[in-house]
Image (cartoon, rainbow, N blue to C red):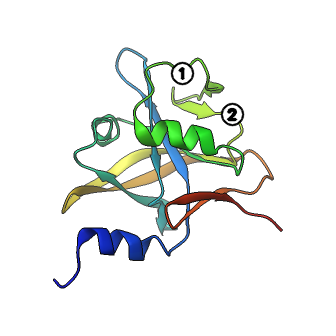
Amino acid sequence: MSFSSHDFRKTMGHFTTGVAILTTCDLENKPHGMTINSLTSASLEPPLLLFCLNKYSKTAHYFTEAPCFAVNILSGHQESIARSFASHDLKNWNDIKWSSSSLGNPIIEGSVAVLECKPHAIHAAGDHHILIAEAHSLDILSPEKPLVFFKSKFYSIKE
């Protein structure tokens, strides 16, 4: 390999992605969340999503072991929430407006859309886990533009 992991990351940063927060509750009903930007649809029949989690993350196990979780697709004005969940698993959700779904997952207020999923498959891939999840419910919550990530920065789409 003639390039570093930094070079690879910098090059991939030129590919614009959406931003989402995975949410779930543990066995004590405590909420957990994690920002992701590797989300993509993998199949329409059945409806499968694919995303990657750093296997060294202190939060990843909540989603690799969860019976279900929500994917909250963020709106352009939710950068601060994305940053909060990107740096650590929040201990105090008091500043986050959310409600509990019928499956018990935290749904973040102001998200553009939400999908509730159950794990389908987990694959090891280098320093990440590739999670494939089946969507069991979905809802478009807002007509707002989504938050996007490009060259290591967050942006709002403008028309």
Residue at 51% of width from left, 26% of height from top? 104
Quadrant in the rendering for residue 56: top left
Q: Nearer the viewer, residue 62 or 6?
A: 6
Q: Is residue 57 visible?
A: yes
The dot on residue 50 is: none
Rendered view: 112 above or below 84: below
Query: Which quadrant of the figure contains the C terminus?
Result: bottom right
The dot on residue 109 is: 2
Q: Nearer the viewer, residue 35 or 140?
A: 35
Q: Is residue 70 visible?
A: no
Residue at 43% of width from left, 17% of height from top? 29
Asked if disc 1 and disc 2 are in contact, CB closer than 8 Å, the reply is: no
Position of residue 52 measured from the top left corner of the image (x, y, whole percent): 35, 57
Position of residue 15 measured from the top left corner of the image (x, y, whole percent): 50, 74
Position of residue 10 measured from the top left corner of the image (x, y, whole percent): 39, 71
Rendered view: 123 above or below 71: below
Instruction: Please tell me how crowded label 2 is: few (under 14), some (14-19), or many (20+) other residues with Cα within 10 Å.
Output: some
Secondary-structure class at tag 2: loop
Q: How far apart in space, not on screen, are marks 1 and 2 (Cα)?
A: 12 Å
Quadrant in the rendering for residue 155: bottom right
Q: Amino acid at mark 2?
A: Glu
Relative side of 148 to 34, left or right: right
Quadrant in the rendering for residue 42: bottom left
Q: Residue furthest left?
A: 1
| Label whose residue precedes the other's in the sequence (1 or 2) | 1
Residue labelled with disc 1: 93
Q: Amino acid at mark 1?
A: Trp
Residue at 81% of width from left, 53% of height from top? 143
Residue at 33% of width from left, 36% of height from top? 59
